[in-house]
Image (cartoon, rainbow, N blue to C red):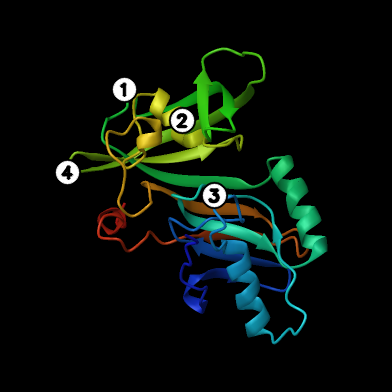
Amino acid sequence: MTIVTKPITDQDVLYEDNHLIAINKRAGDIVQVDETGDESLDEKVKDYLTKKYNKPNGAFLGVVHRLDRPVSGVILFAKTSKALDRINKMFQSRDIHKTYWAVVRNRPIQDEGVLIHWLVKNARKNVTKAYRNEVKGSLRAELSYRLIGELNGYYLLEVYPVTGRPHQIRVQLSTLGCPIVGDNKYGYPRGSMKRSICLHARKLSFEHPVKKDPVNLFAPLPKDGFWERFEGF
């Protein structure tokens, strides 16, 4: 059965100008249509822009990066082909700086560190495996993290991915011994009933691809009865 989710409203928009629009993605939304056929976030954003600007032929929207379905937080789209081309190159050259928040139950041995693994994705099972050393078909993955808070036996990590591999943060933290709360695909003992895991894309920082001004996009935490506890960190 196709799942239809809530439409985009002004409250979901974190930033918009003539070239870009950023949305605070809800956990459970899928960025682009896949084999499930569920309503996708990019189509919802297109509908929002089409109605907002009364575009009879529909609005242009370019997908420049993705967040896993159970992940929430800031996601950026391009509203023009010029912005799409330039922002794609910025992601490729790692000129976009990403910050995530992750909640785990196991405290890492070190309160901060750098993780480097080689990842292999099984597309059929939609799962990624991490290796300590390079293996055939693997891609290098790097991130840094630091412990920024603890609350009632839950630990809040701030994560800075250098690379952007499929499921990278999820599998690398799991390999560290710190699976993300709710992420039973990567070692947490039980999943979430809300189709979500406690991983939130907190911030994107970059130079505007057209105007060249600094842009810092910041996504408030989900109001789901759990994440709000960490808003003060």
Alpha-carbon neighbours of circle 1 within 10 Å: few (<14), some, or many (≥20)? Answer: few
The residue at which mark 1 appears reads as 109
C-alpha span from label 4 to label 3:
28 Å
Q: Residue at x 47, y 75 (%)?
A: 11
Question: Which structural element holds mark 3?
Answer: loop
Which residue matches tag 4?
152
Kind of element beneath mark 2: helix
Nearest to N terminus: mark 4 or mark 3: 3
Check whether the beta carbons of the residues at disc 2 and disc 1 lie within 8 A of each other.
no
The disc labelled 2 sits on which kind of residue? Val
Residue situated in front as seen by the camera: 231 or 24: 24
Count neighbours of disc 2 (C-alpha within 10 A) and say few if under 14, some if 14 to 19, many if 20 or more: many
Residue drawn at 37 percent across, 60 percent down:
222
Q: Nearer the viewer, mark 4 or mark 2?
A: 2
Query: For the view shown, which residue lies furthest in the front direction?
Result: 1
According to the picture, the residue beneath numbered tag 3 turns out to be 67
Indicate which label's residue lies in the foreground, 4 or 3: 3
Question: Count of labels shown?
Answer: 4
Q: Which mark is residue 171?
A: 2
Which of discs 1 and 3 lies nearer the camera? The answer is 3
* Rendering coords of residue 71 (x, y %): 45, 50
